[in-house]
Amino acid sequence: MKKFLIILLVGICSLSAFVVFAETNFGQNLSMGSSGTDVFNLQKLLNSDSETQVSDSGEGSPGKETNYFGKKTKTALEKFQTKYSDNVLKPLGLTTATGFLGQTTRTFINEHFGTTTEETSTEEKKVPVIKAVKPKFISKLGATTTIIADHLSETNRSTNNIELETYDDLVAEDGSVSFILKLSFIHKLKNEIALNNDVLKKLQEQDESLGKEFFLNMVADTIQGIEIVDGKKVLPIKFVVSNFYGDSKSFKAYLDIVSLLR
């Protein structure tokens, strides 16, 4: 059985009574988009006081805390900071709450409240599980990419490892989320190729085999991490989907570089 401590603090700080586990402290900053156990514990703490509740019902409400730091958590933390402004805002010269769990707010909470170390329930461990990414070979700029996954929430976030592109507030429909990849580095390469169009023409005049396809393949060969899959020069791309409960494991698809550069 976990030991817990009932803390009643009154007086100078005008703190309310909180029932908390005093075994763990916040060790990292938290902000919009953060996820993990610390976020769950923060929501538990905020929900301990009716004045700083994350939500009255649904995800984030008392007993239904999640591992995702969204707009409701930010608003609730702002209420907490406003309530204890003498301790967390004034020392920094601030008059308005930030909704950011930084060092000053963390220290104040750790010293006066502690955090709950309760494990999340089975329901709260339902992070997304990616089943497929369509298309597997992404070959056209502006085309829709669809991620099919279990345990998607009403709003989701997708991240890929190509320039750490992130797509927020994706709405799930029938177990999938769809969006258009930015692929800014491909756009930059296409612009550079267009600027060298005169050079390409001169090369082709000297040797007909040195056409645009030859040049595009040369460009593809200069990109770090290029692989040959099904006869295509591709760049592996890994997707991660996040919901209120956490992040999925990464799932691999491929960028068909030569087709994207055409």
Image (cartoon, rainbow, N blue to C red):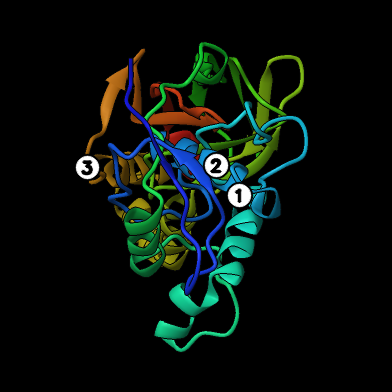
Return the mark for residue 103.
Answer: none
Q: Residues within 10 Å of mark 1 (few under 14, many from 20)?
A: many
Residue 245 point in image, percent of width and height: 53, 28
Q: Nearer the viewer, mark 1 or mark 3?
A: 1
- Give the mark nearest the N terminus, 1 or 3: 1
Q: Residues within 10 Å of mark 2 (few under 14, many from 20)?
A: many
- For disc 1, the marked residue is 73
Measure the C-alpha gap from mark 1 to mark 3: 40 Å
Task: Tell whether 66 sits left or right of 229.
Answer: right
- Give the mark nearest the N terminus, 3 or 2: 2
Circle 1: element type: helix
Task: Tell whether 139 sits left or right of 5.
Answer: right
Residue 137 point in image, percent of width and height: 48, 22
Residue 101 point in image, percent of width and height: 44, 60
Judge by depth and name the residue closer to the eye, 145 or 91: 91
Asked if 209 appears above or below 86 in the picture, the reply is above
Circle 3: element type: loop
- For disc 2, the marked residue is 43
Circle 2: element type: helix
